[in-house]
Amino acid sequence: ENWARFHYTSYDNPLIDPEIIDLAIKKHLSAKADYSCTDYPYRFLPLGLDVDVFNFYALEIAYKNAKKSHQREHVTSYFNENPDVFKINSVNLPKYLESPSLRLTVDTKEDFELINETYAKLYQTGSIFKTKEILDLFKDQPVLKKINAHIIQKKIEYLC
């Protein structure tokens, strides 16, 4: 059997939704995929909320064969550039979560400010707020989206 260990730590994506992580892992396992992504083949979630799941087998192949610097830095680029080598699975999510233009990652001072504002408005001791609650907040208070709307993400060759 192919045993997998799942671990997620993200300091620059603090709003990641644990229910989406769980769903991505379940879909990955049920599809018997090598690589699964919530934003494959195009960005669906806000930047900073996407989830990638891959097997050790796929990681090992990428480690041994990736030669380009972007493939070494962003291992998922190697998966996307070699779809004939890997079984790639798109993790479909509810349409109401589609918000590819939003930026919910922390790379800049403005990103940090937006995350702080989001926590200030949604955080309650003992509970975890989810992606839907964040998107609802931004619908109710669209001025929040303007905090980091001018930031342009550095491009890599593939989204996932």
Image (tube, rainbow, N blue to C red):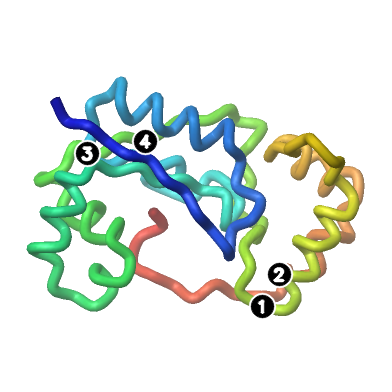
Q: Are marks 3 and 4 in contact (CB under 8 Å)?
A: no
Residue of label 1? 108
CA–CA distance between discs 3 and 4? 11 Å
x 42%, y 46%: residue: 7
CA–CA distance between discs 4 and 1? 29 Å
Tell me the amino acid under the disc marked 2.
Answer: Asp
Q: Nearer the viewer, residue 9 or 52?
A: 9
Query: Does 2 appear above or below 49?
Result: above
* Circle nearer the N terminus (3, 1): 3
Q: Nearer the viewer, residue 10 or 139?
A: 10
- Secondary structure under the numbered disc 4 in the rendered image: strand
Query: Does 16 appear above or below 65?
Result: above
Give the position of the N terminus as an image quadrant.
Answer: top left
Query: Does 139 appear above or below 95?
Result: below
Give the position of the C terminus as an image quadrant.
Answer: bottom left
- Secondary structure under the numbered disc 2 in the rendered image: helix
Residue of label 4? 90
Q: Nearer the viewer, residue 75 or 102?
A: 75
* Circle nearer the N terminus (3, 4): 3
Residue of label 3? 34
| Mark 2 or 4: the one toward you | 2
Tell me the amino acid under the disc marked 3.
Answer: Asp
* Circle nearer the N terminus (3, 2): 3
